Image (cartoon, rainbow, N blue to C red):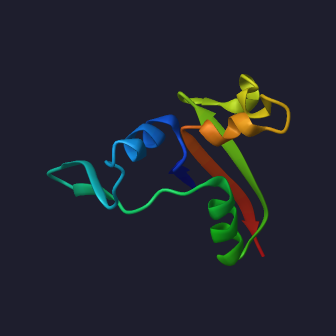
Amino acid sequence: MGTPNIFRPANIVKSLLGRLRFPVCIGGNVEIGDYVHEQEFHEYQLQILMEEAGFINVTIDYVFLGLVSPNIMIKDFPKGGFGKTFAHFLVGSGFKE
């Protein structure tokens, strides 16, 4: 499952300007209706959510500008992986028991 990262750079700017609010309508079409984004998560929140839903061996991948981070190593910079905090999108995967 995936979610935009609540701490992505655009949200930090929105938060500083007082414009980070949920839910938000991010578009829509005639067949499906409005796309309402209820909430975004941080990596640890996504992991806990998946574990509480019964997933095991949960891993989180980090997506920067449409690229999964292992391809560009942003998540490991600087030492300690602080760079992964700024991923635009998070993808959680795991197995059901």
> Residue 84 vs residue 63: left or right?
right
User: Residue 20: where, in percent of width, then height?
Assistant: 36, 51
Q: Quadrant of residue 61?
A: top right
Q: Indicate the quadrant containing the N terminus: top left, top right, bottom left or bottom right.
A: bottom right
Asked if residue 38 is positioned above or below residue 79 in the image, the reply reads below
Q: How many marks?
A: 0
Closer to us: 80 or 62:
80
Of all residues shown, which one is farthest toward the right?
Answer: 79
Is 64 situated above or below 7?
Answer: above
**Residue positioned most to the top:** 72
Percent coordinates x, y for residue 32 in the rendering: 23, 56
Residue at screen point 74% across, 60% down: 94
Quadrant of residue 16 within the rendered picture: top left
Image point 54% across, 38% down: which residue?
A: 88
Residue at 22% x, 56% y is: 34
Q: Position of residue 59 (x, y in %)?
A: 76, 53
Residue 7 image position (x, y, % from top left): 55, 46
> Where is the C terminus found, in terms of image quarters?
bottom right
| Residue depicted at x 55% and y 52% | 2
